Image (cartoon, rainbow, N blue to C red):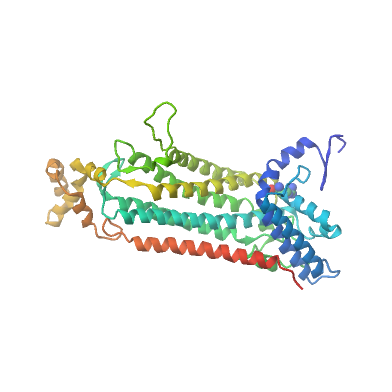
Amino acid sequence: MSNPADTATTVGKINPDVLAFTEGKDPVLDLALAEVDCLGTAAHVTMLTRMAFKPTLFTPEQRNAVVAALADIIAEARRGDFSITAADQDVHLAVERRLTERLGDLGKKVHTCRSRNDQVAVDIRLHIRNELNALRIELADLAADLLALAQKHPRVPLVGRTHLQPAMPSSVAMWASAYAEMLLDDDYLLQAAAKVNNLCPLGSAAGYGVPLPIDRQLTSDLLAFDRPHHNVFYASCARGKDEAVLLSACSQVMLSLSRLAEDLILFSMPEFRYFTLPRDLCTGSSIMPQKYNPDVLELIRAKAALLIGQATAASTILKAMPGGYNRDLQDTKELYMEGLRTTRTSLRIMRLMAQNLTVNPEACRAAFAEPGVFATDRALELVASGMPFRDAYHQVRDHLEDLRGMDPDAVIAQKTHLGGTNGLDLPLLRARADTLRAEASAAQAKAAAAFAALLQPIV
Ligand code: ARG
């Protein structure tokens, strides 16, 4: 390159506009990866130290010096003191620069047998693992809050709706625990995302492996992955797909939250008044003094759209991308980071709603004044006394007024079958939330223990 404005970087001179365009938001986004980048390097250098190869790449003392420097960078990053310069381009080169500044030639050796593609792939997986465990715990907590709401109002009838029209008697407990169960089932998708994520790409290097006898199982074990990706070319192709799968699972969580939000908006309208939203979670109007608006719930609806967009964008980036590393992948980074952040914030804000929602039993019961909602139950009563269903259906339809005065409490008490208004197994759902929380916490603890061990000196 002959452009006098070329900027010197670790990997050569680059036109500044090109540098700005290609690095994009990496100098900022990659700050979230600083700690895991150091851990990935610690595992890699530990493996190189253990490698049966002459000449020795790292003695244990040299490895310990590198790891000590990495531990300092981690501490700096935690304090918010670590920065990535434009010339660094990304966290990987920033860490290598810091190591070389401090350790000289030793710092220059850490990149032996690996590429940045390797590094970014492993960083993202470690970052996602950490975030996803936290997200799963937040999801379990919200499910538990909804179950507590159900438990608090075990026998309050609620008009059940189809097409938004009154359909059949339901209950507050049925409504709240349905969303808890929906979220718990969404966790199956998060579990799948976690499983696909917890595989180690390290050792893929530029995507085709290296001619030295690296121990890929060891780096995978040191970082507490379930196992390494087998085929190193596949390992490089798996980037992006991991993020797309994660976003797709998160978008399902957001869809659940969005539908819950929509119900809450509707049922807290003055015309319904089944629920009252906590005042301090509503916002006012600058002109209308009487207003308490459900902005939080409206934003959750909007954020579900954002997640669907992010999941779609990540998949679309991959769609026609050839095998191997392509820079397109860099743009999946912001998508997955934003998507995780949005999903986690939404879960936490929805917990505040679930914990502080007021249920108005008298308004819930008053909604049964319109008798049609009892029609199906009445028809099935007639069936129980021997009438064919279609005859019962017509008889009830011709005499809807006769249903006036039916007792919704009695009707919801009659549905004793599995999952009916009087057959809800809330303890079973609570046990599922507890199991999920315990699983995600154990995964977090396992990763934390592995990282702590990795940063210890070796002999
Ligand atoms: N910031 C880059 C990314 O996210 C790091 C990998 C760069 N690799 C390369 N071959 N240019 O993809």
Decide which of 141, 226 is in the foreground and name it.
141
Judge from the rendering whether residue 50 lies leftward or rightward of residue 382; answer left or right.
Answer: right
The quadrant where residue 86 appears: top right
Residue 113: horizontal and vertical position, in percent? 78, 60
Q: Residue at x 69, y 66 (%)?
A: 454
Decide which of 107, 152 is in the foreground and name it.
152
Decide which of 239, 145 is in the foreground and name it.
145
Q: Residue at x 67, y 52 (%)?
A: 79
Q: Residue at x 58, y 45 (%)?
A: 338
Q: Residue at x 31, y 53 (%)?
A: 173
Quadrant housing the C terminus: bottom right
User: Height in image: 54 above or below 301?
Assistant: below
Judge from the rendering whether residue 191 lies leftward or rightward of residue 205; answer left or right.
Answer: left
Residue 100: horizontal and vertical position, in percent? 82, 55
Quadrant housing the N terminus: top right
Asked if one can make out residue 120 in the rendered structure from this viewpoint, the answer is no
